[in-house]
Image: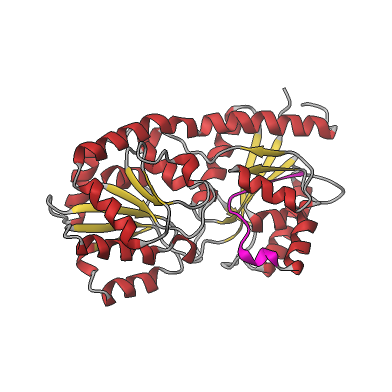
């Protein structure tokens, strides 16, 4: 077989969605006989770093300067330790990978996570990204729409549609009753108070403020409920200030960055996703694997993860009152909530990281073979 030397490039030395994907994919591809390393462009947003995500720079931001310095640092590392393929997880990562490339090596595969923002309509921005796609060799699109965007930019190379994924083991192993008892005890939540979960990086895209709006609307509908928020990010201070200003401090638990997300997801009664934009949300895969009943906004590839009414509930418009109404319906119907969670858990195995890695294995091996490097 051809053993491919792969570098995975992510934005931050911090375990968020893209970074988790890179780490899990690297581990699975190692098991399949390839060699994998994972680098981040810079530090976590708070200046910390994860041992498994070696930062190429000491910068906290993800601006143009960081991309330039990370591309230069990556080029130096590739001279010392050559790689056959760089898998760039996200837009900033692919820009750095393109800067690091010399004389057509290494091959670059762009894993597209999110669609282009509205600013993409500007001619200057289009020219910039057309220049980027001319220097990549293949792309992974989490959804077909993300692949179509590349085609519209003139990319003629292979586009592989491979859905997002997670390792199911930590989530499937959760006993939901035990997890719920433990979380309620830790947070002093009474047994007659429902628990709504929100997991995500606290940034504008994820709309944690809309999660607060939804909680307030749930209260207006007469339901006693707390919101458990797991995640950190640049909006945390503003979010906590908003919680206090709205008189919701007694009903909101801000946990920060957690390593026990599977247990938290296993403990909540209903999980909500309130984002303005997504690709194919990994957190929904995690929630399904943990057996959560889900209420989510219909953004990005959500409908490719959730079968509305069967493995979750999808709300067409990002309206807090509508989200709250569907949340309350589930909170008041425990058998349906459990039925949805159980079915979601069963069907979520299609997003297992081992299955995704098998697809990457085949595609990357073929790409490398076609590039002309002899197998090793």
- Seen from this angle, which residue lies furthest right? 103
Residue 290, visible in the rendered structure: yes
Q: Quadrant of the C terminus?
A: top right
238 part of magenta stretch: no
* Position in image of residue 71 (x %, y %): 73, 58
Report the side of 265 relative to 91 (left or right).
Answer: left
Q: Where does the image place residue 26, in percent across and percent down from the top left?
A: 59, 38
Which residue lies at the image location 58% right of the left edge and 50% below the top edge? 113
Location of residue 299 with respect to 303 vertically, above or below: below
In front of the other: 191 or 107? 191
Instruction: Name the colouring of the figure.
Output: secondary structure
Q: Most extreme residue toward the bottom, as rendered?
A: 245
Lateral position of residue 332 relative to residue 65, left or right? left
Judged left or right of residue 203, residue 79 is: right
- Location of residue 293 in the rendering, given as x and y in whole percent from the top left corner: 31, 43
The stretch of residues the image draws in magenta is 107-121
All told, the count of numbered labels is 0
Residue 333 vs 66, above or below: the answer is: above
Rendered image quadrant of residue 206:
bottom left
- Residue at position x 69%, y 32% in the image: 363
Question: Which quadrant: the N terminus?
Answer: top right
The residue at 13%/54% (across/down) is: 190
Q: Foreground residue, 168 or 278?
A: 278
| Residue at the extreme top | 1
Seen in the image, is 169 located left or right of residue 371? Answer: left
Front in this rendered view, residue 136 or 317: 317
Instruction: Answer yes or no: is residue 111 visible.
Output: no
State the image coordinates of residue 350 (x, y, percent, origin top left).
Answer: 48, 30
**Which residue: 47% across, 64% down?**
203
Quarter of the figure with residue 335: top left
């Amino acid at each position: 077989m051809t053993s491919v030397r792969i570098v995975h490039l992510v934005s931050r030395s911090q375990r968020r969605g893209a970074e988790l994907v890179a780490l899990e994919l690297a581990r699975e591809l190692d098991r399949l006989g390839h060699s994998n390393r994972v680098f981040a462009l810079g530090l976590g947003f708070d200046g910390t770093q994860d041992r498994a995500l070696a930062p190429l720079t000491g910068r906290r931001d993800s601006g143009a300067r960081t991309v330039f310095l990370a591309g230069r640092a990556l080029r130096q590392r590739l001279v010392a330790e050559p790689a056959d393929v760089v898998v760039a997880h996200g837009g900033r990562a692919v820009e750095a990978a393109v800067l690091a490339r010399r004389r057509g090596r290494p091959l670059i595969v762009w894993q597209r996570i999110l669609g282009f923002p509205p600013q993409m309509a500007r001619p200057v921005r289009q020219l910039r990204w057309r220049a980027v796609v001319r220097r990549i060799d293949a792309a992974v699109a989490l959804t077909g729409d993300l692949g179509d965007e590349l085609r519209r930019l003139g990319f003629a190379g292979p586009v592989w549609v491979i859905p997002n994924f997670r390792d199911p083991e930590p989530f499937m192993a959760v006993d939901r009753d035990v997890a719920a008892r433990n979380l309620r005890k830790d947070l002093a939540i009474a047994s007659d108070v429902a628990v709504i979960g929100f997991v995500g990086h606290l940034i504008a895209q994820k709309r944690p403020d809309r999660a607060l709006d939804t909680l307030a609307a749930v209260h207006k509908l007469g339901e006693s409920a707390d919101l458990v928020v797991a995640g950190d990010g640049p909006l945390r201070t503003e979010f906590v200030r908003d919680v206090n200003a709205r008189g919701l401090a007694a009903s909101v638990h801000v946990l920060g960055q957690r390593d026990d997300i599977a247990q938290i997801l296993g403990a909540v009664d209903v999980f909500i996703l309130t984002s303005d934009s997504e690709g194919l949300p990994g957190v929904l895969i995690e929630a399904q694997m943990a057996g959560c009943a889900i209420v989510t906004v219909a953004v990005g590839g959500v409908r490719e993860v959730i079968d509305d009414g069967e493995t979750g509930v999808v709300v067409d418009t990002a309206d807090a009152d509508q989200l709250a109404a569907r949340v309350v319906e589930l909170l008041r119907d425990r058998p349906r909530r459990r039925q949805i969670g159980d079915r979601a858990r069963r069907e979520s195995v299609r997003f297992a990281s081992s299955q995704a890695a098998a697809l990457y294995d085949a595609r990357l091996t073929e790409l490398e073979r076609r590039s002309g490097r002899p197998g090793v």
